[in-house]
């Protein structure tokens, strides 16, 4: 990441630098002043001043002479998540769905063109991957994301997708015409599949969460390894369970 103290139009450079440091510590873990300075393309004195400010505010801590993110961010993250009606509406219903399927479930909302997981629950045998609460994903690579794209309005979908579709695995749909055809099929059947399109060896089934007036609120999915997510159960039974859970969550979110 390359940042400096001079912001562009409407951007405060110092704020940009502080958040660049926070994101570096998130991605790289505990780091020293020199590591931060090199990563962000700033002077060591600037890096030190920002780190010390974040330290005094409680947003970073020192561990063995290096700086790491502090637990104070948990409070901010919890407040950001709980403002979504879907988070509250999903608890219980998603837990029951995961108990029935026996894998892992997630609830996603879209923000700034990315999918953000606001709730996850995992069965005892469910596999944990790189995703967790707060993880952001490319919408076209996931069952939750494709469910959302299929049911959002066309103008917003075009704003999100553009012409560049990053390919994460050999099965990721990176052609816009092919993706549009897939989204048409998802609207027709009411659910989406992810066949190793984000992570090799993992499949998922997703469905949109809709309000009473058919406005898209978010989406849900269950995911698991290809060795278990297969056959008639995966293609027929799981989608019905996922769609039913999504309908219940939509009703709860609408009337809560």
Image (cartoon, rainbow, N blue to C red):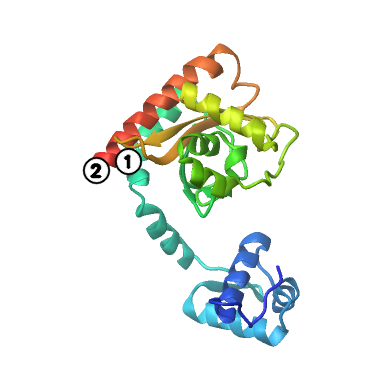
Q: Which residue is the site of mark 2? A: 256
Q: Give above or below for 155 relative to 125.
A: below
Left or right of 211? Residue 131 is right
Left or right, residue 126 beside residue 255: right
In primary-sequence order, the first of circles 1 and 2 is: 1
Query: Residue drawn 59% across and 22% down?
Result: 229
Viewer-proximal residue, 209 or 182? 182
Viewer-side residue, 91 vs 157: 157
Q: Nearer the viewer, residue 105 or 114?
A: 114
Mark 1 highlights which residue?
89
| Residue 35 makes an appearance in the image | yes
Q: Where does residue 137 sit, x and y in percent of width and height?
A: 58, 46
Q: Position of residue 80 (x, y in %)?
A: 41, 58
Disc number placed over residue 197 in the picture, else none: none
The part of the image, by quadrant, that contains residue 253 is top left
Residue count near mark 2 (Cα–Cα under 10 Å), binned few <14, some 14–19, many ≥20:
few
Dots 1, 2 in contact, CB < 8 A: yes
Question: Where in the figure is residue 239, as x and y percent of width and height?
Answer: 48, 22
- At which x and y percent is residue 242? 44, 26
**Residue 202 relative to residue 247: left or right:** right
Total label count?
Answer: 2
Q: Quadrant of the N terminus?
A: bottom right
Q: Secondary structure at mark 2?
A: loop
């Amino acid at each position: 990441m390359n940042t400096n103290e001079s912001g562009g139009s409407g951007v405060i450079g110092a704020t940009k630098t502080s958040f660049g440091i926070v994101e570096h510590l998130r991605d790289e873990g505990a780091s020293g002043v020199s590591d931060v300075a090199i990563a962000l393309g700033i002077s060591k004195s600037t890096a030190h001043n920002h780190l010390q400010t974040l330290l005094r505010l409680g947003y970073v801590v020192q561990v063995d002479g290096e700086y790491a993110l502090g637990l104070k961010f948990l409070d901010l993250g919890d407040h950001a998540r709980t403002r979504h009606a879907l988070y509250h509406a999903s608890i219980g219903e998603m837990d029951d769905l995961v108990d029935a399927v026996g894998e892992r479930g997630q609830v996603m909302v879209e923000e700034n063109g990315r999918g953000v997981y606001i709730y996850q629950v995992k069965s005892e045998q469910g596999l944990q991957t790189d995703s967790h609460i707060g993880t952001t994903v490319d919408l076209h690579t996931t069952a939750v994301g494709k469910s959302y794209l299929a049911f959002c309005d066309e103008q917003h979908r075009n704003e999100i997708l553009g012409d560049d579709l990053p390919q994460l695995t050999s099965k990721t749909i990176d052609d816009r015409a092919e993706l549009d055809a897939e989204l048409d099929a998802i609207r027709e059947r009411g659910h989406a599949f992810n066949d190793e399109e984000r992570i090799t060896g993992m499949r998922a089934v997703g469905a949109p969460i809709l309000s009473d007036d058919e406005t898209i609120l978010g989406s849900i999915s269950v995911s698991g390894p290809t060795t278990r997510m297969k056959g008639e159960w995966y293609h027929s039974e799981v989608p019905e369970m996922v769609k039913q859970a999504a309908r219940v969550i939509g009703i709860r979110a609408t009337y809560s």
